Image (spheres, helix red, strand yellow):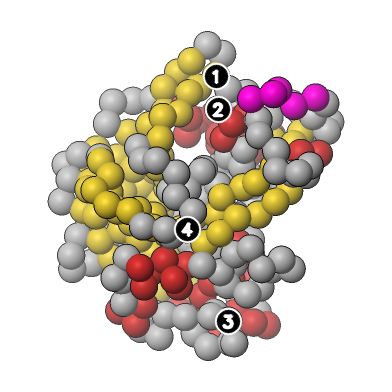
Amino acid sequence: MRSISSGRHHATFEFGDLRVISLRDGYIDMPPTRLRTEDGCVLGELPPSVPLVGDNLRLSVNAFFVTDGTRSVLIDTGASDNWHDPTMGLIYDALDEAGIDRARITDVAITHNHEDHVSGLIAPGGSQAFPGLERVWIGAGDTSVFTGRLAPILDRVVPVSELVSINEWATAIPTPGHTPGHTVYEIRSGAGHLIVWGDTVHVPTLQFERPGVSWEFDGDQSQARTARAALLERLTRPHHFVAGAHLDSPGIARVSASGAGYALEYLAPPIG
Ligand SMILES: [Zn+2]
């Protein structure tokens, strides 16, 4: 897998016969007190290697578009204008910049029902962001989000409760923990396996080295920790890559074992 081009809000990767395009929706600033130790306590002192912006951690917010030229899937959709601070909602600019016609997107796969992942199905102003949408794959435990603002999408929801193929090269894998319906998507090509893992890690400068550290919004911290451990171990296999919603944009990396934890190596320089 290799980076072949990038812009302000997107980066394109060649992945065998597939193209993977990382789309930057923006960022979220959150206080480090959201980090939790293995005992569920607020993490004490942060290592100096974890950067802060003011007093906050800055989390990138990414979505990913994968295509073989005929079939495509958009994984996550950003926050649109549905967040208290206007730091997100760039996905539509990112799609334009990458030359992706929103009207031709038929399949969206959602990692979980939090606003920075699902809200972009509705564009600012209230119209449907993807007018040709046919299917929205999402974990069965997370489908209750399709009310109110998202109610117009409900008729296209495909609940995922077990391993299921979206197409010849994309598989939905339930990984409950962060939310009951949290789902990762495995993309396979001749170049290997890409795991698009949603909110498995929120703070990459800390949680690879210390994968036992959790996030306040991991609904079931112990289950989220178990899911994270299994995915990280799997990603150390040859020809495996990760795409993370909150890894530093563009958010695609290789993972290796390192000491008691893991190390990540980004495949492209930062954007945004
Ligand atoms: Zn998130």
Instruction: Say whether marks 4 and 3 touch (CB < 8 Å).
Output: no
Mark before the other along the chain sequence, 2 or 4: 4
Label 1, label 4: how far apart the Cα atoms are:
27 Å
Instruction: Say whether marks 1 and 4 touch (CB < 8 Å).
Output: no
Residue positioned 49% across, 54% down in the render: 272
User: Residue 236, which numbered label?
Assistant: none
Residue receiving disc 2: 208
Residue receiving disc 4: 24
Which of discs 3 and 1 lies nearer the camera? The answer is 3
Question: Which three-letter amino acid code belongs to the residue tagged 2?
Answer: Phe
Is 234 or 247 nearer to us in this picture? 247
Q: Position of residue 147 (x, y in %)?
A: 65, 79
Which image quadrant for residue 32? top right
Mark before the other along the chain sequence, 4 or 3: 4
Mark before the other along the chain sequence, 1 or 2: 2
Which of discs 3 and 2 lies nearer the camera? The answer is 3
Q: Would the CB of label 3 be found within 8 Å of ligand 1?
A: no
Label 3, label 1: how far apart the Cα atoms are:
41 Å
Residue range corresponding to the magenta coloring: 45-49
- Compared across the picture, whether 141 is left or right of 186 comes to right
Instruction: Using a 10 Å C-alpha cutoff, classify the residue at mark 4 as few (fewer than 14 neighbours), some (14 to 19) or many (20 or more).
Output: many
Question: Which three-letter amino acid code belongs to the residue tagged 1?
Answer: Gly
Mark before the other along the chain sequence, 1 or 4: 4
Whether residue 145 appears in this view of the structure is yes
